[in-house]
């Protein structure tokens, strides 16, 4: 087990750090499975996003950004987006979202390119 706050290569917190923060011991291999699930989801997301961008190139006035994040980070990212691009000015919205294994949320935020 690593004792660093985050593994330098993956950026993932160590099992020991997570257990210390939560005060609970996770089942054997739990964090490894969570990390693998997130990695798989991100790879699927990248593939899906690149296909979609190629298909939508030049056809839409909307600016879209898609994220695949754990639930708490997804909520924070959405809040930041709406703070930066208010709905009244940019018609910002969560276009779509889905829940992936391991409490991971994939969501697409869209907005108009500029406020009038």
Image (cartoon, rainbow, N blue to C red):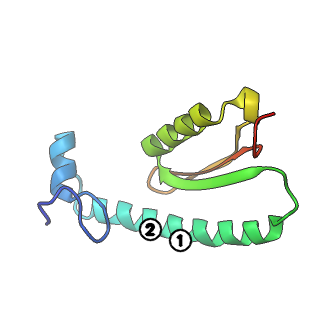
Whether 7 is drawn above or below 82: the answer is below
Q: Residue at x 71, y 38 (%)?
A: 93
Question: In the rendered view, does 2 fall on the left or right side of 116?
Answer: left
At mark 1, the secondary structure is helix
Residue reaching furthest right? 59
**Residue that mark 2 sits on:** 39
Question: In the rendered view, does 82 fall on the left or right side of 42?
Answer: right
For disc 2, the neighbor class at 10 Å (few under 14, some 14 to 19, many from 20) is some
Whether 88 is drawn above or below 8: the answer is above
Q: Quadrant of the C terminus?
A: top right
Whether 74 is drawn above or below 57: the answer is above
Pointers 2 and 1 in contact (C-beta within 8 Å): yes
Q: Quadrant of residue 83?
A: top right
Residue sitting nearer the eye, 4 or 111: 111
Q: Is residue 7 visible?
A: yes
Give percent across and percent down for residue 58. Answer: 85, 64
Residue reaching furthest front? 116
Residues at marks 2 and 1, CA–CA distance in whole angstroms: 6 Å
**Residue that mark 1 sits on:** 43
Give percent across and percent down for residue 12. Answer: 30, 61
Give percent across and percent down for residue 68. Answer: 53, 56
Q: Quadrant of the N terminus?
A: bottom left
For disc 1, the neighbor class at 10 Å (few under 14, some 14 to 19, many from 20) is few
Q: Quadrant of residue 89?
A: top right
Q: Residue at x 44, y 44 (%)?
A: 73
Residue sitting nearer the eye, 46 or 99: 46
At mark 2, the secondary structure is helix
Q: Is residue 25 visible?
A: no
């Amino acid at each position: 087990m690593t004792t660093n706050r985050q593994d330098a290569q993956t950026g993932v917190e160590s099992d020991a750090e997570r257990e210390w923060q939560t005060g609970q011991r996770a089942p054997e291999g739990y964090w490894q499975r969570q990390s693998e699930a997130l990695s798989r989801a991100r790879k699927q997301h990248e593939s899906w996003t690149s296909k979609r961008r190629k298909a939508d190139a030049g056809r839409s006035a909307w600016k879209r950004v898609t994220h695949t994040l754990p639930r708490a980070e997804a909520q924070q990212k959405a809040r930041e987006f709406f703070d930066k691009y208010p709905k009244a000015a940019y018609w910002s919205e969560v276009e779509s979202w889905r829940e992936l294994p391991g409490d991971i949320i994939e969501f697409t935020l869209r907005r108009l390119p500029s406020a009038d």
